[in-house]
Image (cartoon, rainbow, N blue to C red):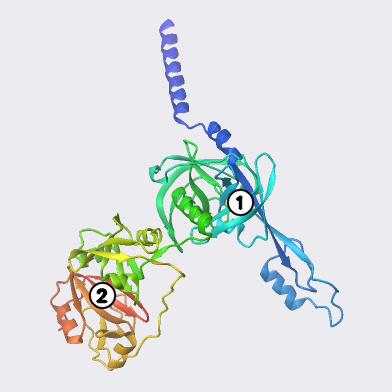
């Protein structure tokens, strides 16, 4: 009996020790919230909107499509029946979060939180409220800097996002759905995320519960330092689904500094169109592994052209920083001060070359527009090993495209192995780092005939005003 009691006591002690050890491993966020929560604010904006004369105002039905229904199907007052005086005004409010970065009242939040607001109100956790003015907002990074007239305010401390590790605990404080000073926690899911249309921010991905109203609030590490600004969620429902994205604190600090000094953000640009380097492209270009940014085209008169950058170059480093993915280049270039003279390294025809470039300033987005397919002169109906029919470009086509060579795709057969379209112009063939300009159908077909069946090649393709690289893995047996 005594032995049984001893064994039971042993296992009970072991179980208690395991529970206590597990409890010690779980983080305690209470001190962080007590020390940093006072610097997190609630932001609301008011926007005055003119109501359309003569339309009924139905609470909760502000949707544009519903209003359009009323415009079309509800009778309007006739001439002389309109009410006198100015049209009635209604107010729309939006809620978001922010945080104090200096004791004299500077506040950081998201640009989309305050966009379009006629009046911005900042509410502190101690219930004090202030009218805020916008010092500056940058839509590209979704950062806005506000100022309230106050002093002696609690301010956050900033940490280094580069020190964040995937799997590390992080905490968000904000006002989801208007519930002020809500605290949620999770881990860092990934770093350096690229999102569509967001080329200048290497987002921190977390699984922290972020919902509408959290936007603009801080993301803390366990040391109580702000490492990011909660900005976006990935959701099919509008609510939390385990994918949240924060702007790194170093990006936000650089933006707010420029907004405070100049009211706007100056970004670098070099004037190139790029694409990702896939494994097949790396093989075709003779590169050791997929890395860098492949230059599709170089803008006329741009800093890149003046520096000697050429289409088909692969940019490997910029200003001493490695370009591992094509998405890295816009961030690095954008973060470089205009006017700076910086080095870059490119992979060109099987070897590295070092260049120097004077960085220009990004003024506006440039969107390449695809032109209409151009008609080529009649060609032989014989398809080559790619399953396409080609013809030499006419003098007029060369003049229009501003090129001195190229082959026009006149037909794409069902068995085609190349992702090209009728009207595309093939400019260059790349194989094992060797670049060959395409000047005749006979030359091109001979090149194809000389390649093994499992060869990997890359074609430089001109489509309207755009240039891209298309990789082909494996060729049909030679039909010649």
Q: Which mark is residue 370?
A: none
Q: Position of residue 24 (x, y in %)?
A: 46, 26
Between residues 22 and 352, which one lies in front from this camera angle? 352
Q: Residue at x 31, y 92 (%)?
A: 396
Q: Which quarter of the figure has residue 45?
A: bottom right
Q: Element type at marker 1?
A: strand
Where 293 falls versus 310 (above or below)? above
Where 200 falls versus 107 (above or below)? below
The residue under label 2 is: 459
Crowdedness near tag 1: few (<14), some (14–19) or many (≥20) residues, C-alpha within 10 Å: many
Q: Position of residue 189 (x, y in %)?
A: 43, 46
Q: Position of residue 242 (x, y in %)?
A: 50, 48
Looking at the rendered image, the quarter that the C terminus falls into is bottom left
The residue under label 1 is: 147
Cβ–Cβ below 8 Å for labels 2 and 1?
no
Disc 2/disc 1 C-alpha distance (Å): 54 Å
In the figure, is residue 60 to the left or right of 163?
Answer: right
Q: Residue at x 23, y 91 (%)?
A: 380
Looking at the rendered image, the quarter that the N terminus falls into is top left
Q: Is residue 461 visible?
A: yes
Q: Which quarter of the figure has residue 332?
A: bottom left
Where 112 falls versus 71 (above or below)? above
């Amino acid at each position: 009996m005594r032995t049984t009691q001893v064994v039971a006591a042993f296992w009970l002690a072991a179980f208690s020790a395991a529970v206590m050890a597990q409890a010690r491993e779980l983080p305690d966020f209470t001190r962080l919230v007590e020390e940093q929560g006072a610097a997190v604010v609630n932001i609301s904006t008011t926007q005055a909107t003119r109501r359309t004369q003569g339309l009924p105002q139905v609470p909760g039905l502000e949707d544009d499509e519903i209003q359009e229904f009323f415009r079309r199907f509800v009778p309007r007052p006739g001439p002389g029946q309109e009410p006198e005086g100015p049209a009635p005004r209604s107010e729309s409010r939006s809620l978001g979060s922010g945080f104090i970065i200096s004791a004299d009242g500077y506040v950081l939040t998201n640009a989309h939180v305050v966009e379009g607001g006629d009046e911005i109100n900042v509410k502190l956790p101690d219930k004090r409220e202030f009218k805020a003015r916008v010092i500056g907002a940058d839509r590209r990074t979704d950062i806005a800097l506000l100022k309230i007239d106050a002093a002696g305010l609690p301010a956050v401390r900033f940490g280094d996002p580069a020190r964040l590790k995937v799997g590390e605990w992080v905490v968000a404080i904000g006002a989801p759905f208007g519930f002020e000073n809500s605290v949620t926690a999770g881990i860092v899911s990934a770093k350096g995320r690229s999102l569509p249309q967001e080329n200048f921010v290497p987002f921190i991905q977390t699984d922290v519960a972020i919902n509408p109203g959290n936007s603009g609030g801080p993301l803390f590490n366990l040391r109580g330092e702000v490492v990011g600004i909660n900005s976006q969620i990935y959701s099919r429902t509008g609510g939390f689904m385990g994918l949240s994205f924060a702007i790194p604190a170093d990006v936000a600090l650089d933006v707010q500094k420029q907004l405070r000094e100049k009211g706007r953000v100056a970004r670098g640009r070099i004037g190139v169109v790029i694409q990702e380097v896939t494994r097949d492209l790396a093989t075709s270009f003779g590169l050791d592994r997929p890395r860098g940014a492949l230059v599709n085209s170089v803008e006329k008169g741009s800093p890149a052209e003046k520096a000697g950058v050429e289409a088909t170059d692969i940019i490997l480093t910029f200003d001493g920083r490695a370009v591992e993915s094509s998405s890295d280049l816009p961030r690095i270039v954008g973060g470089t001060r205009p006017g700076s003279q910086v080095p870059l390294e490119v992979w060109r025809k099987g070897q590295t070359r070092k260049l120097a470039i004077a960085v220009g300033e990004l003024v506006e987005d440039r969107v390449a527009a695809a032109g209409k397919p151009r008609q080529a002169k009649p060609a032989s109906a014989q398809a080559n090993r790619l399953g396409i029919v080609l013809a030499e470009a006419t003098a007029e086509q060369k003049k229009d495209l501003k090129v001195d060579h190229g082959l026009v795709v006149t037909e794409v057969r069902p068995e085609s192995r190349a992702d090209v379209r009728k009207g595309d112009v093939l400019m260059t063939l790349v194989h094992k780092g060797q670049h060959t300009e395409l000047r005749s159908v006979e030359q091109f077909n001979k090149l194809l005939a000389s390649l093994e069946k499992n060869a990997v090649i890359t074609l430089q393709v001109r489509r309207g005003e755009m240039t891209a690289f298309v990789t082909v893995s494996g060729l049909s047996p030679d039909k010649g």
